[in-house]
Amino acid sequence: EPLDLFAEETPPDLETLREQAAACTRCELYEHTTQTVFGVGPAKARLVMVGEQPGDQEDRQGAPFVGPAGKLLDEALDEAGIARDDAYVTNAVKHFNFRYQGKRRIHETPKAGHIKACRPWLDAELAAVAPQVLLTLGATAGKALLGSAFRITAERGEPRPWNDLTLVPTIHPSAILRADPARGQDRDEMFAGFVADLRTAGELLH
Ligand code: URA
């Protein structure tokens, strides 16, 4: 049946959304994935974090940020004094986009069409949770919510008003995992900058 998330006067609750999203065929990614990976966290969280899309582990386990990037996110949140369980964590795209390299599934950046198709779910999650602060992790989440002109290097760490909340863009934890010293990227420095952005977001909570 057609998706009509906003036909009702009151926005659908997260459980209803999760059930509907589990059957989503709005783009083709559902065809080769294990499951929809919907957001996880308190229904009235003050902080929402938006990543890009589930990775291999997330696709298998059905929850966001439970693989290597999630482990790094946990470390950074810990250092920033933010309890992950107090935040609602989700992704701009809710199915894993990948290609095979032999038997391995390799992450592929989601296409604009995937992000667009998935957007109603993210909007509905944000309407249901109504957080005070929204952290976007990485360029994909930033562009998904701020538009294609968003530039992560110039704009990360700078809070901005966005709809009824404050949005803080930051880098993606995977970028830290991929840090390449040959390209002048220092892992520890990137981690510290990531923690600083998380702190900025944490300090905006009231
Ligand atoms: N990377 C993301 O952007 N989201 C996840 O859930 C896992 C890895």
Image (tube, rainbow, N blue to C red):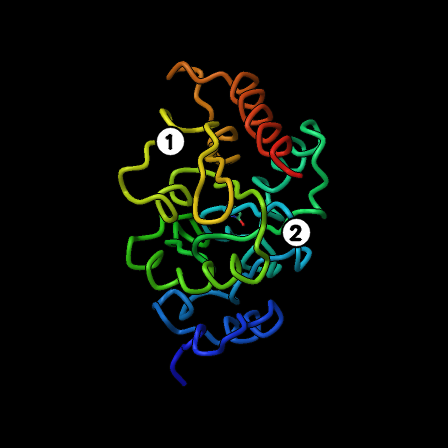
Q: Is mark 2 within 8 Å of ligand 1?
A: no
Residue 140's place in the image compared with 96, above or below, is above
Give the left or right position of residue 200, taking residue 167 as reference: right
In the drawing, does residue 204 fall left or right of residue 175? right
Disc 1 to disc 2, C-alpha distance: 25 Å
Q: Secondary structure at mark 2?
A: loop
Q: Residue furthest bottom?
A: 1
Callout 2 crowding tier (Cα within 10 Å): few <14, some 14–19, many ≥20: some
The amino acid pointed to by label 1 is Ile
Residue depicted at 54% across the width and 71% down the height: 17
Viewer-nearest residue: 189 or 17: 17
**Frontmost residue, 163 versus 151:** 163
Measuring 57% from the left and 18% from the top, which residue is drawn there? 188
Indicate the quadrant containing the N terminus: top left, top right, bottom left or bottom right.
bottom left
Examine the rendered structure and indicate whether residue 203 appears above or below residue 64.
above
Within 8 Å: ligand 1 and the Cβ of disc 1?
no
Q: Which residue is mark 2?
A: 45
The answer to which of 178 and 63 lies nearer the viewer is: 63
Residue 65 position in % (x across, y down): 59, 47
Quadrant containing the C terminus is top right
* Relative height, residue 9 to residue 185 (above, below): below
* Mark earlier in primary sequence (1, 2): 2
* Amino acid type of the residue that numbered disc 2 sits on in the rendered structure: Ala
The quarter holding residue 5 reads bottom left
> Residue 127 has which mark?
none
Mark 1 lies on a secondary structure that is: helix
Residue 51, position in %: x, y? 49, 46
Residue drawn 38% across the image and 44% down it: 140
Q: Is residue 6 above or below residue 104?
A: below
Instruction: Estimate the x, y position of residue 194 in percent, counting from the top left.
Output: 55, 27
Residue wearing tag 1: 152
Residue 181: x and y, percent? Answer: 44, 16
